[in-house]
Amino acid sequence: MSVDDTGARHQGKNGYCTHIGNELFSWFESTSSKSRINFLRLLRAGRPDYVINSDAVAYWEAQGLSRAVRNLLSTQDDGPRVFADDAQWEQYLNQKGVRNARHIQMATEGALFGSIIEHGISKNLVILSDDAGQFKVLLHALCWIHAERSIDRITPMSEKGRDDLEEVLKRLWQLYRDLKIYKTDPQPAEAERLDRVFDEIFTMKTHSASLNNALKRISNNKAELLLVLRHPEIPLHNNLSENAIREYAQRRKISGGTRSEAGRRSRDTFTSLKKTCRKLGVSFWHYLGDRLNKIFSIPNLADLIRCRALKPG
């Protein structure tokens, strides 16, 4: 699943629109925040609940929430494990005496994570992004194009540094081409070779301090950049989401933003429908006419998505 966000002003205030999609659908939602809490709320797909379960507790532990707070929130002797809405969740935090802002944030993220897993989202769902922190949940993969940009923008100050940069870019793009080939025929031996090549490139010591720092940052993201070796079905770049959300950036330049909640909802809904129709090869104009005239000769888009997803190849 590919994700991205962009600015989307509403009622004269800065807001954001998040895109979630793949090759079969696009979905847009505008909100006032682009935090991880906001992203997890979007993944609930309209459900308002918070859930404390083993997945929530595991999330808290992975994020470094203190053992004392984890034990306080996950005790089984009182209170519900499912909280119907924001009000119930906030009341529970108050009852437990959780008032530190960082603790509230991590606790809320964990309960939202528990909710999305409880409602059927797989813990093995891959989230592909451009390295924005709010999207680092589930199995997180990074875009190779964004990784390359961090190197390409470097301007070395010496001739040796420029030669090193040219060599790094040459080897990086060769690795990228090899990863594309691997995706078509994934073999364990080739995966091991590509893993070694990654280390050879991104642990290099060059004559440019800026280039060394960029290589180190990419090396630290190895697991997310090479997730494709375990999941060859995922794309190597996030262009799908970037292209999908570009329309919002263009509209922002023309109209400035939305004024009413109905207007914001209409923009998100119709953009989602239009781009999903395009991916499915359905005429958006004919789809609207079919629904407005209550003909229903065109199948539900959800049914078309399921059918295409199940189709071999």
Image: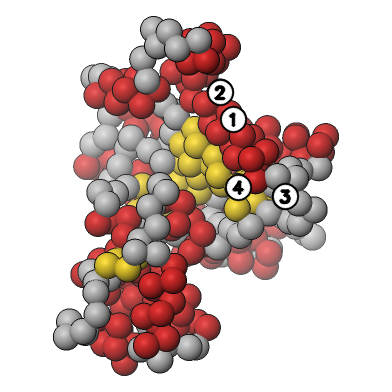
Which residue is located at x 31 percent, y 60 percent? 115
Q: CA distance from mark 1 to mark 3?
A: 16 Å
Q: CA distance from mark 4 to mark 2?
A: 16 Å
Instruction: Tell me the residue that label 4 is attached to.
Output: 30
Which of the two discs, 1 and 4, labels the residue nearer the N terminus? Answer: 4
x, y (%) of residue 64?
38, 81
Instruction: Tell me the residue that label 3 is attached to.
Output: 10
**Quadrant (top left, top right, bottom left, bottom right) of the C terminus:** top left
Per the image, label 2 sits on a secondary structure element best described as helix
Which residue is located at x 22 percent, y 42 percent? 188
**Camera-side residue of 94 and 59:** 94
Which residue is located at x 36 percent, y 80 percent? 92
Whether residue 6 is visible, yes or no, is: no
* Residue type, mark 3 in image: His
Residue density around tag 2, few if under 14, some if 14–19, many if 20 or more, within 10 Å: some
Whether residue 249 is visible, yes or no, is: yes
Which of the two discs, 2 and 3, labels the residue nearer the N terminus? Answer: 3
* Residue type, mark 2 in image: Lys
Instruction: Tell me the residue that label 1 is attached to.
Output: 271
Q: Are marks 4 and 3 in contact (CB under 8 Å)?
A: yes
Q: Could you tell me how many numbered marks the image carries? A: 4
**Camera-side residue of 51 and 170:** 51
Relative side of 122 to 228, left or right: left
Q: As drawn, which residue projects farthest toward the front? A: 294
x, y (%) of residue 249?
72, 39
Which of the two discs, 1 and 3, labels the residue nearer the N terminus? Answer: 3
Which of the labelled discs sits on residue 274, or is there none? 2
Q: In the rendered view, would you say 94 is above or below 278?
A: below
